[in-house]
Image: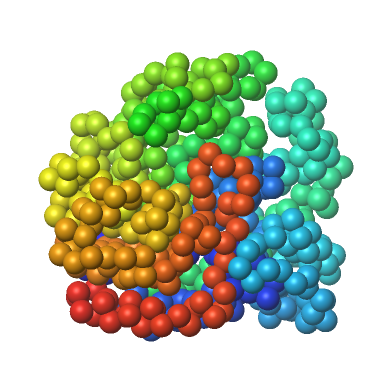
Amino acid sequence: MNIRSSGILLHITSLPSRFGIGDLGPAAYDFADFLRSHGQLYWQFLPTTPTTEVMGNSPYASWSAFAGNPLLISPEMMVEDGIITWEEVRDAPQGHASHVNYGAMGIYKAHLLRLAFARRKKSLNACPHFAEFKENHAQWLRDYARFVTIMDEHPGKIWSQWPDPLKHRDKEALEQWDTEHSDAIMFEEFVQHIFFSQWKRLRAYCNRNGLYLIGDIPIYVTHHSADVWTNPHLFKLDENGNPTHVGGVPPDYFSATGQRWGNPVFNWEAMQHEKFEWWVHRMRHNIILMDKIRLDHFRGFAGYWEIPASETTAINGKWVEAPGMELFRTFTLRLGMLPIIAEDLGVITADVRELKHQFNLPGMKILQFGFGGDLSRNPDTPFHHEANCVLYTGTHDNSTVKGWYVTEAGDHGRNNLHEFVGQCTDLDNVHLTFMRLAMQSVANTVIFPVQDIIGLDNSGRMNTPSTANGNWEWRMTKEQQQHPMFNRLAQLTGLFGRWT
């Protein structure tokens, strides 16, 4: 990311689609063409691992760090591959054009996938592509399929509440499970084969046309996940498999009690003993899928806020040092140059900065944060940006620019913005002002959420942290993709030397 360039943040679920949720089908290819025709180099999205309604459909709370989300599988591509028919997809439930209905889409796509599996089941074991896929993903695939099938048989229970032989992964119990549930396990493997086949084709198409994909890795994994069930020794758990300590962030100006995320923290001593093999495999897996990777909560690799699991808030946590230098040296030795964007937001101390600089990783700047307080001391103010960073007008966790202007900037922030740009900015043009400021920044890479290009208010916000409902649902309509502001984006991309 050492050339001037720009890109768009739009999660795949937010693409237009006749199936009620964006997916890896024709709309994704159309959007890739659209980005390149407007001079954009990058398409960034959120994690693509499985989501669940129990966890609010958050892409940051998955039961696997490796599997693909079946909801992103394209029915149209399945038809193209001959595993379902047009007649079978013709009666798709009518979703809302601007919001995802996860429940209805989950039921519908599961139905299509089971139709396809029933049609292919007898020939799968003789299929060389399926065999190759299982071999390439052997380190996680079978245990993921086991996890999902056991979970389906024990609804409402997390893995630490399963019968002891399954909870503790008794060898004979797992072999018996594999025998008695062979079709269900093969179905889950088949679904993953379809996902990764569709993903591989989309990425190859994007790369051939000069578009590069930026993915996202959350630092922590969910307790109720195949990863923790398979590797309990790599996490701080008690003898019953429940977390003894969980992650979060300490109290600050925004929250008097901090944030208690609830994810089990890593047992870094065990990770070190195994030469970080789990992390190396996770990183390699994502490098194969993406061109660049945003590493969420980067500061947690230098030091993390550890909270006793018995605490209901983050107040009584403590800072614990993490072996980030050793981990990233291992990454470099095993994987080569790291295609990582360090999400270095929040409480950033000298050890975090040193870790980032030691491996020459670009950090992040958020333009919305750049107009509060004393601008001469604000690290997000444009004149404090550096070339080796990725500048965002906002992220999935922020208000839109218009939403920020109305609900968060306050008189002080709005006045700072007006003084900075030398003219009065109002609600009608603040998103264009932010586009210009970002494009003319010294930051090598600039990423715009689609909502900030077309000037949406907070009705287009993707996620509001610490709220339970209405998140991760926003979708771009076909009409919005034709918004004239995209032409303005293309003009500014060329004007400020970012057209590639």
Q: In which quadrant will I find the N terminus?
A: bottom left
Residue 442, percent from left and from top: 17, 61
Residue 451, percent from left and from top: 45, 66
Residue at 48% x, 82% y: name it.
482
- Indicate the colouring scheme: rainbow
Q: Is residue 431 above or below residue 332?
A: below
Residue at 35% x, 46% y: name it.
343
Q: Is residue 220 above or below residue 16?
A: above
Residue 188, percent from left and from top: 73, 53
* 161 lies left or right of 271: right
Quarter occupied by residue 153: top right
Q: In which quadrant will I find the C terminus?
A: bottom left
* 112 lies left or right of 458: right
Can I make out residue 196 in this image? no
Front position in the image: 314 or 106? 314
Front position in the image: 368 or 155? 368
Quarter occupied by residue 251: top left
Residue at 29% x, 50% y: name it.
411
* 311 lies left or right of 317: right
Can I make out residue 463 in this image? yes
Front position in the image: 471 or 203? 471
Quarter occupied by residue 130: bottom right
Q: How many marks?
A: 0
Residue 273, percent from left and from top: 43, 25
Residue at 63% x, 56% y: name it.
69
